[in-house]
Amino acid sequence: MKNIQVIDGADNCTFSIFQATNAEFALLFPAEGQDLQFAEDLDAQALNALGPVWDRPIPKRDVQGIHGTLFYGFAGKRSHFPASKQEADWPADALNPAQRRRHVRGPR
């Protein structure tokens, strides 16, 4: 199972995490190494895969890693995200100093 955090503009600001099977994750994050996705980019097959995912919330205290982030309502902010949809590709000026140090040394 892979963990997906959902970021949206809801007033409750829960930014909940859900578990997806490897097959569901591959539909939601189809590119090699992809770990960022916009809901607006999901095709019909991926949207269907979300049905079972919504039934698998996981409390944050039980999460051991977040494998992907799904954004709802962020299409207007797309220019701020890496075109690769890989978190490892954030531009250095979007990161704080500690993140930049990790970004430079860290694995992809």
Image: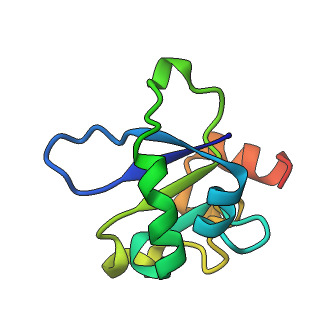
Residue 91 seen:
no
Q: Quadrant of the N terminus?
A: top right
Q: Is residue 65 visible?
A: yes
Q: Tell me residue 101's x, y (percent).
A: 74, 45
The quadrant the C terminus occupies is bottom right
Q: Position of residue 76 (x, y in %)?
A: 31, 80
Residue at image location 55% in from the left, 47% down from the top: 96
- Residue 59's place in the image compared with 70, above or below, is above
The image's colouring method is: rainbow
Residue 74 location, x and y as percent? 34, 71
Q: Nearer the viewer, residue 3 or 74?
A: 3
Q: Which residue is at a point 67% across and 77% down the rendered structure image?
A: 84
**Residue placed furthest toward the left:** 11
Q: Position of residue 95 (x, y in %)?
A: 56, 54
The residue positioned 69% from the left and 64% from the top of the image is: 26
Count of numbered circles in the view: 0
Q: Is residue 63 left or right of residue 80?
A: right
Q: Nearer the viewer, residue 11 or 20?
A: 20
Q: Residue at x 77, y 64 (%)?
A: 33
Among all residues in the image, which is located at the extreme top? 61
Q: Classify 40 as above or below 1.
A: below
